[in-house]
Image: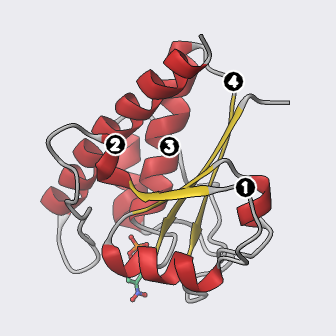
Amino acid sequence: MPSHSVLFVCLGNICRSPLAEAAFRRAAEEAGLDVHVDSAGTADYHVGQPPDPRSIDEAHRQGIDISGYRGRQLAAEDFHRFDFIFGMDRSNMQGIAARDPGNGKARTAMLLDLVPGSEGRELSDPWYGGEDNFRATWEDVTMAADALVELLSKRNG
Ligand code: 4NP
């Protein structure tokens, strides 16, 4: 069984959280960390759909294929199955709290709280933006993924 399980959550599970999932998968693999990783949306708008083409393109530019990812909605069981659930912005955190059954094990936080100097900063939605916004999303999720790997590596002893 993997020693750490992490779920990344945004609104639609097609723009930001799939990129966060991809960045953390890669960072954990490079660090030799045994993790279970997934992503989900607070909303059900894009359940069963692949990531936004602009997220697929950005991941592709980073050498990662996320075209096989499929959207799903955050469920109460996730709070029992995952050690950590990270939201991207304050609205996501409200959506996460609304689905929290209250008796799970998951610790919840906003993703950029992991990055020293970026605590409290929201990872803004690139949905209405262009390629530059998706690039900025990649940079943010990569910083957070690296910080999380460092944190979990230390915990592993
Ligand atoms: P995400 O971006 O939450 O990063 O996946 C969005 C995806 C879909 C919508 C909004 C944001 N939407 O309104 O459908």
Q: Which mark, by number, is residue 22?
A: 3
Per the model, the C-alpha gap separating discs 4 and 2 is 19 Å
- Where is 111 relative to 24, above or below? below
Compare marks 4 and 3 and give the one earlier in the sequence: 3
Examine the rendered structure and indicate whether residue 101 appears above or below residue 33.
below
The residue under the point 17% across, 68% down is 130
Q: Say what secondary structure mark 4 lies in.
A: loop
Residue ID for mark 4: 34
Tell me if mark 1 has few (under 14), some (14-19) or many (20+) residues whose alpha carbon lies within 10 angstroms of its own: few
Inspect the image, locate mark 1, and give the three-letter code of the amino acid beneath it.
Lys
Secondary structure at numbered mark 1: loop
Q: Position of residue 38 (x, y in %)?
A: 64, 52
Q: Earlier in the sequence, mark 4 or mark 1?
A: 4
Residue 1 x/y as whole percent: 86, 30
Q: Is residue 8 left or right of residue 111?
A: right
- Between discs 1 and 3, the one toward the N terminus: 3
